[in-house]
Image (cartoon, rainbow, N blue to C red):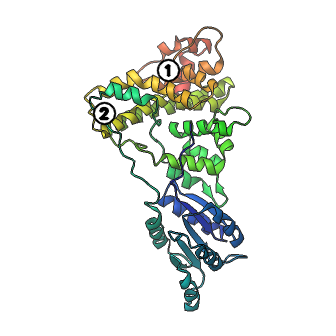
Amino acid sequence: MADTDTTTAPRVLIAEPDPRLRELLTRLLLSVRADVLIDACENGSQAMAQLVHHPDLVIAARELAGLDGLDLLRSVRREARKPVLPFILMSDRSDSAAVREALPLAPTAYLTKPLNMQALQQRVQDLLQGFGQEDDPPPVMMPGMTLERFLEARRIDTEGAPLMADVQTAVMRSLNPRGLNLRLFEAEIRIDPQVTAVLLAAANSAAQHREGKVQTLLQALAKLGAVQSLNLVMGLALKRSAKLKDAELAEYAEYYWGLSLHTAEYARTLARMLEVDQERCYCAGLLHCLGDLALLRCLQDWKLAGGKLEEGDTAKALKAFGASYGSELRRRWRLPLELRDLIASIYGFGGGVYARDDLAMNLAAQLARLKSDEGLEEIAKSKSARLLKMGVPELSRLRRA
């Protein structure tokens, strides 16, 4: 899978000596544009070095060590860039002499501290909200196209599942003055199948092919690092149909998401009991409905293109295409074969020796699909339960856990 395209995302340089204010400005920028790329530094020399990245906006304090913010602005204006680079200058000084000194350099805004964050947010929003974004048109419906043909064609190029987690909130909760806390970030986004799959795919791509394959979200985050992980995740929110707005399709998505989460949690509990890799089993459980969720996203595209969904069409499409969509995504995104085999064990076994983690996955999926008014007797008779020596009493305790 190719990395998420970030070429149209705006880049902002923050030059501010106070780490708390740098964090506050970072949060403000992300609240305005989820995909913004941020270079943050604490002094003027660092800021000058960062200019080689060609930012689309500079927010700089006048009172910087070494090269001050006014000198930084002077250097930027000397380049005579077209269009003019927006530059917001912040300062502790509000006297008329200080303002007059800055005015000939045409700062986009001259703001005095303490900052009016609401006014700054509005100013930044005006500068960034429409930057670099092209309309993402809905798919075009070819004459005579049927739903079956549409879904078959989309199977090989689907972008995956809709987002189920609020990624922007996840980012905000995981930021600290030193940047993105990867462990906190993992805890926030681990519930989302699409985010997990995309980060795994990126971490296992040819560009990242170092050491062995990664099979868990935390391993993927560690390999990609904070900046690339953040850019990939925030870029997902800008894709067409990233969120399902159709009520019926969203209801189906909630069901499959819930099924994924329940399977993942049961799998982790069983893995802990059986002393096998808990996080790997959790990841396999989370991803096993990826195809069903991706199909629902394509059905929304079908409707956006003017197609109709009659009663029962969604259920029929899921039954006919859900599994093949999942297989295609796992293959195209080059998810590790070991992880794919673990997902496959949810649906059944081949011959030979059965590994404990395979048995755990199969049993976890059965428990996740069990309705609240159904008993455990049939599950207790299954091959996975019998081989793991789990009867109705043990399954009952597991179900209550």
Instruction: Name the residue located 58 percent from the left edge and 24 percent from the top edge.
Output: 340
User: In the current view of this chain or complex, which residue is farthest to the bottom?
Assistant: 97
Between residues 63 and 155, which one lies in front from this camera angle? Answer: 155
Q: In x, y percent, where is residue 17?
A: 67, 71
Which residue position is annotated with label 2?
142
Helix, strand or loop under label 2 = loop
In this image, 396 relative to 249: left or right?
A: right
Residue that sits furthest to the top in the current view:
351
Q: Residue at x 65, y 46 (%)?
A: 183
Would you say residue 369 is visible in this rendering? no
Q: Position of residue 106 (x, y in %)?
A: 52, 80
Q: Position of residue 279 (x, y in %)?
A: 63, 33
Mark 1 highlights which residue? 366
Q: Which residue shows up at 47% across the image and 35% down it?
A: 160
Instruction: Mark 2 or mark 1: name the one nearer the start of the chain.
Output: 2
| Local crowd size for mark 2, using a 10 Å CA cut-off: few (<14), some (14–19), many (≥20) | few
Q: Where 83 sits versus 399, above or below?
A: below
Location of residue 274 with respect to 205 vertically, above or below? above
- Could you say which is closer to the camera, residue 50 or residue 121? 50
Label 1 is placed on what type of residue? Answer: Gln
Amino acid beneath label 2: Met
* Crowd around label 1: few <14 · some 14–19 · many ≥20 (10 Å): some
Residue 46 visible somewhere in the drawing: yes
- What is the quadrant of residue 197 in the picture? top right
